[in-house]
Image (spheres, rainbow, N blue to C red):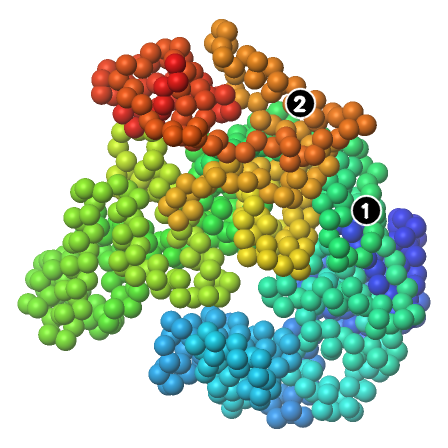
Amino acid sequence: MNYLDGLNPSQRAAVEQIEGPVMIVAGAGSGKTRVITYRVAHLIRKGVDPFNILVLTFTNKAAKEMRERIMKVVGSEAKNIWMGTFHSVFAKLLRVEATKIGYPSNFTIYDTDDSKSLIRTILKEKQLDDKLYNANFVYNRISSSKNNLISPAEYLQNEQIQAEDFSTGRGNLGEIYQIYAQRCFKAGAMDFDDLLFKTNVLLREHPEVLYKYQNKFKYLMVDEYQDTNFSQYLIVKKLAANNENICVVGDDAQSIYAFRGANIQNILNFEKDYPDLKVFKLEQNYRSTQNIVSVANSIIANNKNQLKKSVFSENEEGDKIKVSRAFSDNEEGKIVAEAIVQEQAQKGSKYHDFAILYRTNAQSRAMEEALRKLNVPYKIYGGLSFYQRKEIKDLIAYFRLTFNPNDEEALKRVINYPRRGIGDTTIERIMIAADQHNLTMWEVICDAPVYLDSRSSASVANFASLIQSFQVMTKTHSAYDTALHIAQHSTLLKDLYSDKSVEGLSRYENIQELLNGIKEFSEREDIEEKGLDIFMQDIALLTNDDNDKNPDADTVSLMTIHSAKGLEFDNVFVVGLEENLFPSQMSLSSRTDLEEERRLFYVAITRAGKKLMLSYATSRYRWGTLTSCEPSRFIEEIDARYLELDFKAQTKNTGSSLFDDERSAWQQKETFSKPKPSSIPKTSSILPKAHVPSEGFAPSDTSGLQMGMEVEHERFGFGKVIHLEGNKPDIKATIFFKDLGQKQLLLKFAKLKIIK
């Protein structure tokens, strides 16, 4: 069979157009990889020498997959194509040409760790505050400058940049960048960003080299063009300037990497660079049901800055998109975990058919805990499980040490983190003294002046006092107050807060999320014991199976939406759809940022093949305070006819109740998922919000509480007591809440107001 026969008309037209500038706007699930593959194969079939074809991708995986597919059509000739990531292709080119710009051809390539290590050395030499000039922050600043083709000299001369640095108290950034660049050059080394930056320098300063590669690469193809930055854009533009046989493939609706320097304008303005451009739109989605495609379209239509296309699916209509409302993030985790177990039992699905997508890494905690409680195996894609993240292990090591100061592993982990002047030599002396005198390390630390010299014993004695003060704290304070005190007074929070890079922010959020989890535990109204030691037991039980991971095991995938790009799953859960979380709080001040967030939501939705579930919580702990959450504007933007609202409480037949009227009104809400064509309700009008306590709400004395009484709870809303058990002071009440169904509460902790 001819390889072109399996293509739809728009795919085939894009493949056959091999001359001149071409842009292929490929909607989600539209067979983009197939089109690139066949287009390259078609070029070769038409007599183009594979050595004259350059294909640029964003991941090695994509390049490998494409090459294998091309080989199936044209055979071993495919090996001769220049194909790979921007960095790998131009590293190869620089190996040949490096001497022209003063580098040896065997130059070293510094990875991120090498770069940061060099930055730390420079900071030390210059005696600069490494909190203010955090290595991650400085690295990202230099990286962003290179991606925008700003050299150290230009950086120092640019008034705007200088003013910005001085205003944040970091006036030395330009000098650090200059020294960093000089040191790399001296060492015959390039960092990742240099591979593109220096290619630009080479092509600008050596026209003969530019001419050579313009003639070599007669045909250029660029995948994921919406993710290119200025540096990548310029290289491609220069190389294609002679023949203009350039084909870019991408989807502006999936441009989500602005924080890495990606510039959506590259794809939006492509036509301005090439007026005789031919545009092909791949609009048929082969991945998702019609309903999922319709939801995605109704979302992205709200973006003003986009290339118009109308994605459609000829697949089955499929289920409506379920929207679940949870009372808290822990409950949201429980709803998702139960839905997975149920779907798996009913349909016989594999766990790998399910993915849970969230906006920030920290959100994985609630999901992980819920999955573990139901014994659902999972893996975190592109990252570590919550309790394996360094910052979490650090804080938990402080907790462990507080309850058991003889825990040597925990001790060694945090004795000098954050740095407090206890170096490796001192730690070795402590270990030797412990061994010689048959003591624990902690005993040596508590008696530091006896075993250590006066210089190091002062720092060690301060550390001992710190841990002892934490021990005192645990005796009288709740789990949350103790945990917060430890996070603050160990200076761990401060250390993380000072790192303003994307990674630093994520680590800080993770610590906040751990504290939020402890706060929620401290506030539980159904258990007696709520100390930090009890929380730690729970964690230990949960994390015990972390290391027991078979890479080939059948697992549910958990990941951030950024990590999910390019992947697909039958069943997708998008969680945490609340204002200030998704869209993120930082994106609400500008249209550009908000549109980027909306594209991120579009990417999340279009990962789903058969079923999509969206969820939000009406309350979440932030910084230890319970805050009410508004449903995300993105849910409100979805046409309500595609939605099924999953808000019915788990009703128990409790005879006649004060809620009968409300319940019948409530059940009518289901008609919203099957609206009359004439009047489609606005989604926002049917999304329940958090309960707002009645004016002057104050908990009542519940010692005389009886079955059948009506009550109000500060967070759960209005309810009716349906069962009481146990003896004073440990009476447990089972209460049916209108919006949530049944809950069990210990009366002595429960915040209830008796209505009648």
Q: Quadrant of the C terminus?
A: top left
Q: Which structural element holds mark 2?
A: helix
Residue to which mark 1 is pinned: 311
Residue to which mark 2 is pinned: 670
Left of 690 or right of it: where is 388? left
What amino acid is found at the position of numbered circle 2 in the picture? Glu
Task: Name the residue at 63% across, 44% down.
Answer: 633
What amino acid is found at the position of numbered circle 1 in the picture? Val
Left of 723 or right of it: where is 664? right
Residue 708: percent from left, percent from top:
40, 10
Instruction: Specify the quadrant of the image occupied by residue 479.
Output: top left
Q: Is residue 375 visible?
A: no
Residue 226: percent from left, percent from top:
73, 63
Q: Nearer the viewer, residue 546 or 677?
A: 677
Q: Residue furthest top?
A: 655
Q: Are marks 1 and 2 in contact (CB under 8 Å)?
A: no
Left of 366 or right of it: where is 91? right
Dot 2, crowdedness within 10 Å: few (<14), some or many (≥20)? some
Task: Name the residue at 45% across, 83% down.
Answer: 172
Dot 1, crowdedness within 10 Å: few (<14), some or many (≥20)? many
354 to 282, vertically: above or below: above
368 to 252, vertically: above or below: above
Q: Which structural element holds mark 1?
A: loop
Count of all numbered marks drawn on residues in the image: 2
